[in-house]
Amino acid sequence: MLTAIVAGLISGSVLLLATVGFELVRRVEGFLNIAHPQLIVLGGFSAYGFNVQLGMHWILSCFAAIVVTTLVGVVSARLIFWPMRGRPHHIPLIASVGLAFFLHSMIELFTGYGVKTLDVPLQETLRIGETAVAGIDQIAVIVIAAAVALALHFWLSQSYSGRAMRAMANNQALAEVRGVNTSYLQYVTWAVSSALAALAGILIALTGRIYPELGWDQVLLISAAAIIGGLGSIYGVMLAAVLVGLTSSLTTLVMPSQYTQMVVFAVIGLVVFFRPEGLFSGPKERVA
Amino acid sequence: MSTLLIVAGLITLMGIYGVAALALNLQFGAGGMVNFGVAAFFGVGAYGYALAVMPAPSGSYTYILGLGLPWGAGAIFGGLVSALLALVVGVALLRVGGDYLAVVTLALAEMTRQLFMNQPTIANGARGLLDAPVPYVESIPGRMQSVFIAGIALVVLAVTFLLFRRVTRSAFGRSLLAVKQNEAVARSLGVNVYAVKLKAFVFAAFFMGLAGVMYVWYLSILTPTFFSVNITFTIFIALIIGGTGSNVGAVVGAIVLLGMREGLTYIQVDFITSERMTSLQDALQGVVLIVILLFWPGGLSRPRLAVYPPPAEVSPAPRVLATTAAGGRP
Amino acid sequence: MNSANPLLEIDGLVKTFGQLRALDGVDMSVEQGKITGLIGPNGSGKTTLFNAVSGFLRPDEGTVVFDGRVVTGASAHRLAGAGLKRTFQNTADFTDMSVLQNLLTSVRSVPGESLARLFTSPRRVWRSERDLVDRAWTLLERMGMAELANTRAGDLSIGRGRLLQIARLLMDPPSLLMLDEPSSGLNPEDQHRLSSTVRQLRDAEGVTVLVIEHNMSFINTISDALYVMHEGHVIASGQPAEVVRDPLVIETYLGVRHVPA
């Protein structure tokens, strides 16, 4: 039971990092970036590439992975998504699927197929003795995610760029009129969102195993968190991510793990059907 | 002889892709509904067909149903199963609209795949059904059966094309197009947006299921890979290459994409394993999709405006009305 | 204002968005066979009222009676079917269809709308389609737009686009036509054509019209009755000539903040 809760908190934390980035892009750019989960995989696998294939120290590899993933995210936005501004929102949505395919195949081609683990000293050595409910690495993941969430909170609420970004997410034209440098902020958005995805992938790789199909599996969980979090504040989405992580982990206690996805799916269905605006959001003005 | 078999195979594949692309065109091209779960309807149709046609289970395989229907009835059964799934999904999601449909259908395909993989009782689980039933006629000699199947596929494609052309050119098709272009205005004109979308979604899903049935005929095996996300995006790419919104485009796109893929498989390089080949194909498909969306959004065959010739003889009635509302214009 | 024969009666309509009471108890009565104008500064709730009446927003309180039936909260497509149709402020054509196709979209209950009948009774579908196209040609000739029939609607000028919106509704004339700022962005010639079309609709077809406007001269020339809204209330109503002299209305339009008595 306790282990399931810890596992749920971990996957919730990772999901939080992944979903916040997905949600930032959705709000600023107005489309669902299906390639976002592939950036998670890219983060994990490039850490693996630097660490295992090139033999770099694991901490260094993680930083290198974040840099690589951030670059890929920003470049993809610059080359693919920004030129599509002003076209119907399903155009970038479909393009993002093309990008997801491309990234997924490239990861397979460069780092190979199957399940990978990082070469990290943490995993074997630093476990707590008899009543082991969580390894140091697992606690580290939760702490890192909480720290990042806190940092995000201060960034969005205190700093100029964070507030400007929220303004832009609400109303881009208005933000522009008020003198917000939207083009600079769009770079920031994509960089932050890709870096968070990379971090999520690295944390998955550190505490467990990564595999190329992880991205497609994460699409469902991330969208679940985004849908359940709804149109309200970004904190609702964070909370929803942790809840989705916990639920999917706790359902493994009562039914085989193959069915976790179906439970998550059913939850999405119920939310969409009964509260399409999400669980954590007030009524929204809807004008024709 | 072997060339004939290759050609027959290509024609069958063309029928499969073409029918699925036509169906997606009604949902996405005409109706603006982003269905990322084409594979779910494709796979459900395929399994529905196989389970309806196979005899009651015996021996090493486990599966449900096993009705022993003839293949024609089985194919229609497969389509209906797919349409039924579309009805459930549509009722839940089309009222809400937006990108939910895209995300949830994407998840739906994965969900069905896992269901069929992890539940051996439904259709033999991950190993699938290795000798799934294909249309078979006694009087045709063994190796010519695939030519026969190609013939059926071609007929199905032609009939499907005519049906979809009829639908998109009708008042129904116009309402659907109106909903896609401006939902609020369509509502203000009395269009029941939800009903129109739901009908189109379910109608098209029948043919996605039928495409899945034909894929069983082509491979004569049936595994949960029928639900793979690759199927969905192959169909999307075909439609976008061909020209979103155009029935001719859907078929042309299917043919062109098929040519490209088959061409690729003939590039045999020693160091490329088949696994890597698949990855390369996926990467290439992704790039093609992005490049087309960026630089060539109309595709090969843009939908054209329907041109109506002016009425041959001007009846006297309008002249009388003209005096009431010409608004000071000749 | 009490009218003898109201086609549309709005009673105590309230719509709130969070803290904002966009409609704060609106009462209004639109008389059969008349052109009723609705004016008010930006944000006074005119378009919200339109949305709430025509089924695009669900009002929080109050009732809407149309043609003797309570239709509060009914869906837009049902109201349109019952004869209450509206236009939108921005040109709202189906831009990727031809002008003629735009007209064809507005007729409901034709056999071609049923997927089953397309295949079971193709001859009936074909005949109704031919009749529909003939009707559309006739209408376009009447409105002096026949030469544009096969043009893409997105390529029309703003004025022609606005006329197309109205023409589209005339394919199946409603009993109540609600126009949302039909004259904005039109040149004087198009404005003139628009106002004479609306007047002829009233006189020749007996259509009742409710029209939102900013353009005072336009509204003065066409309306038989006038309502003024401000901050979600109706603050004046009556004959157009009287209403525009109302001190409260003048104050509102001069931008002085209105304090409810």
Image (tube, coloured by chain):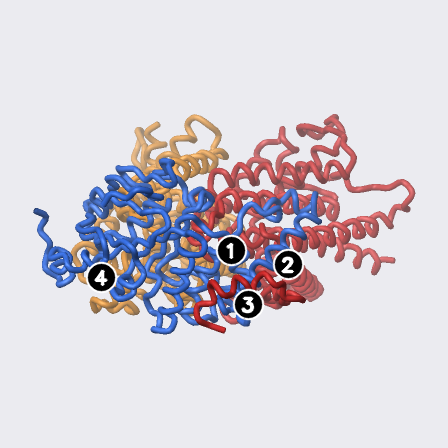
Chain colours: A orange, B red, C blue
Question: Where is mark 2, residue-wise?
Answer: B247
Mark 1 Cα-neighbour bin, 10 Å: few <14, some 14–19, many ≥20: some
Mark 4 Cα-neighbour bin, 10 Å: few <14, some 14–19, many ≥20: many
Q: Position of residue B174 (x, y in %)?
A: 56, 55
Q: Amino acid at mark 1?
A: Met
Q: Residue at x 32, y 66 (%)?
A: C184
Q: Amino acid at mark 2?
A: Asn
Rounded to the nearest whole Å, what is the CA distance between mark 4 and mark 2?
Answer: 45 Å
Mark number for residue A164?
Answer: 4
Regarding mark 1 in the picture, which secondary structure is present there? loop
- Cβ atoms under marks 1 and 4 closer than 8 Å: no
Regarding mark 3 in the picture, which secondary structure is present there? loop
Q: Chain of mark 3?
A: C
Which callout, 1 or 4, points to the residue nearer the camera? 1
Q: Amino acid at mark 3?
A: Ala
Question: Where is mark 1, residue-wise?
Answer: C171
Q: Position of residue C150 (x, y in %)?
A: 57, 68
Mark 3 Cα-neighbour bin, 10 Å: few <14, some 14–19, many ≥20: many
- Cβ atoms under marks 1 and 2 closer than 8 Å: no
Q: Amino acid at mark 4?
A: Ala
Regarding mark 4 in the picture, which secondary structure is present there? helix
